[in-house]
Image (cartoon, rainbow, N blue to C red):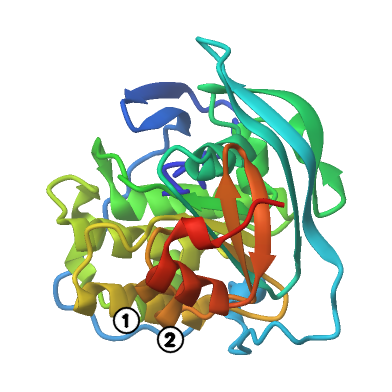
Amino acid sequence: MALVWQIQCTASPPLPSLPFFKRKSSSSPSLPLPLTRSFRLRFTHVPSPRPVAASISSVESPTSVDGLGNNKTPLLEVKGLTAVIAETKQEILKGVDLVVNHGEIHAIMGKNGSGKSTFSKVLVGHPDYEVTGGSVVFKGENLLDMEPEERSLAGLFMSFQSPVEIPGVNNIDFLHMAYNARRKKLGQPELGPLEFYAYIYPKLDLVNMKTDFLNRNVNEGFSGGERKRNEILQLAVLGADFAILDEIDSGLDVDALRDVAKAVNGLLTLKNSVLMITHYRRLLEFIKPTFIHIMEDGRIIKTGDSSLAQILEEKGYNAIPSA
């Protein structure tokens, strides 16, 4: 969820004179959430609003990514990254190297326990893990020096496998707060409730969601498919530069997966990038990766094109030699 960190890590940074609270979840880190005055708009019979010029990033562009653009400036550069579980000091990442350029889609595949999800959580600053070596540069800055909320506001988004519920916080308030926090970071004026609704309204169609979802508490009582759509709605609203999608295909039927993949593809441009983590080739048939990486024992051991997924499906991981 990156909002439940852009919060799903995405949390917004402290806003002046706004108190904070923290929630704990077994599947997600503590997330600082600024409390805002709830305007709780109720949307029942509302005509389509006029578009508002509220673009904050390349997400507003209709251009699609083909991985062949001329701009190959690294968006994310990871070198020799090592990390341990904070509590037990067990080493999980053992020297991860990865470069993601603007406009690229990368997929990481690997057996259970290979370090895929740990890698993604380390990137967003999950407190359960401690970095012990290596470097991560995001948009030219040292990502490891940033707090989780700073990473979010810098344009990093993560969608977790199991998005958490946030009782008492409805979607419209949550999205509005997070969006304005990012606009403030970019030096742009905040949007009022009606302006924000005009901004978010067309994005509901992108993820095949009805307006009544905005009045419901974040992920509370949502089905698996609804939660994943809600994650992508957050991504669409926030306009992140780099989205980490951790097993967004998990628990989805074919129709729901197609809807989620269509929404993700609709957000891709030549300027933003995506890192997908998955076990299955079917996701890669809907969202075409520029590169596929195979992770084993805390390292990326093989990088190739989409043919790697075909090899895995037919012959398994034993067919992929270690580097």
Badge 1 crowding class, 10 Å Cα cut-off, few under 14, some 14 to 19, many 20 or more, is: few
* Label 2: element kind: loop
Q: Residue at x 29, y 73 (%)?
A: 257
Q: Which mark is residue 88?
A: none
Picture layout, residue 171 above or below residue 93: below
Residue 307, image quadrant: bottom right
* Label 1: element kind: helix
Question: What residue does disc 2 label?
Answer: 50
> In this orientation, which residue lies closer to the viewer: 164 or 166?
164
Which-is-in-front pick, marks 1 and 2? 1
Numbered disc total: 2
In x, y percent, where is residue 182? 61, 52
Q: Is residue 206 shown left or right of residue 310?
A: left
Question: What residue does disc 1 label?
Answer: 205
Picture layout, residue 62 above or below residue 249: below
Q: Residue at x 47, y 48 (%)?
A: 2
Residue 33 visible in the shown view: yes
In x, y percent, where is residue 211? 22, 70
Q: Is residue 165 shown left or right of residue 102?
A: left
In x, y percent, where is residue 222? 16, 53
